[in-house]
Amino acid sequence: MDPLRAMWEPIQDACGQGRPACSLSSPIAGRAEGWYARAPASRSLSSATDDIGRSGRGLPLIPPRAVWYQDCVKDMADEKRVPTVVLRRLILSSVVFFIVLLVAMFLPAGDIRWEKGWLFLLVYLVLIVLGVVYLWRVNPDIFVARSKIQEGTKGWDKVLVSILLLAHMAEFPVAALDDGRFRWSGVSLWVVILGYVLLCVGFFVIAWVEKVNKFAEPGVRVHAEQKVIDTGPYTLVRHPMYAGAVPFFVGIALALGSYWALVPAAIATMLLVVRTVMEDRTLHEELAGYKEYAARVRYRLIPGIW
């Protein structure tokens, strides 16, 4: 058999059978099979060999697998980007976020040597890296879902989320002014340690939610493919991501050594409660099966309380 044909036939078979492209591509792709479009059956062996013949250069510089993979990428819809594109976007947004944090923390602190600020950034960076690596392996779809505010997001939620994020981000300059510049709070070491415990607990709960719920978008909406998630933390409360966000907000303030930063944290928490009520109402009205789920899991945010 011709060597070129021997290389192309398994690929052509895979295209014809509608296998995911990741089955023939990189190991990363293999762990993200849900993100790839099906292989295009239109790419025939004859057209590939004709292209090579017309080039006059024999075998192409790009291996046949890569050529086929590129064709698959071209046919993908915008909402189903290849993981490398999503990863680049994630890395870029994370870099920008940390630059914003640096400015929001150390400019109000007035001292680049603010130790609590650097320690927080280090711990936060480690948590984010560990979370991204873990979620990339167990539920890569979540990066697409949370990459932007999706079309169809409720208008009231866009306004609410904007205010909530402002309150959350206000924690950093307030803490910097408090502990970094004026030393208003003067918190003890055990309070800072408690802050990191709460921060890690909140981060763990949020990551747990993102592991089991590929529909955990940043905005509130109900779409055709959405279904009720009733596993993992959703067996305890109906809105576990918000339940994890509360200790996360409080933990940031205490880890940075500031009682005053608890004020914007409390505002963000109250906005989360409002959002929980409104989102729960939306899901009752629009998501099939949610009423039955709510009958089984009675509590919205705090197990045994509310």
Image (spheres, grey):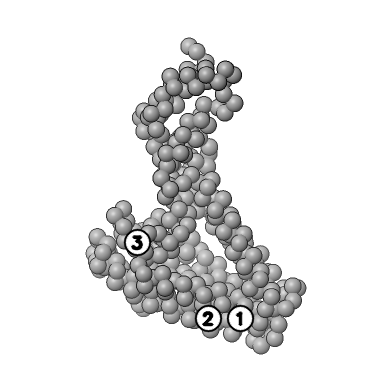
User: Mark 1 — residue?
Assistant: 174
- Mark 1 belongs to which amino acid? Val
Relative to 292, residue 252 above or below: below
Quarter holding the C terminus is bottom left
Residue at position x 36%, y 64% from top? 153
SS type, badge 1: helix
* Camera-nearest residue between 77 and 90: 77
Label 1 packing within 10 angstroms: few (<14), some (14-19), many (20+): many
Q: Are marks 1 and 2 in contact (CB under 8 Å)?
A: yes
Observer able to see residue 2 = yes
User: Mark 3 — residue?
Assistant: 152
Q: Between marks 3 and 2, how big is the CA–CA gap?
A: 29 Å
Disc on the earlier residue, 1 or 2? 1
Observer able to see residue 139 = no
Residue at position x 46%, y 69% from top? 244
Quadrant location of residue 35?
A: top left
- Mark 3 belongs to which amino acid? Gly
Q: Between marks 3 and 1, how big is the CA–CA gap?
A: 34 Å
Residue at position x 49%, y 35% from top? 70
Q: Between marks 1 and 2, how big is the CA–CA gap?
A: 8 Å
Residue 64 locus on image (x, y percent): 52, 26
Residue 145 locus on image (x, y percent): 43, 56
* Camera-nearest residue between 109 and 249: 109
User: Mark 2 — residue?
Assistant: 264
Residue 1 locus on image (x, y percent): 48, 11
Relative to 207, residue 52 above or below: above
Disc on the earlier residue, 3 or 1? 3
Relative to 56, residue 102 above or below: below
Apparent side of residue 137 relative to residue 221 in the rendered image (left or right): right
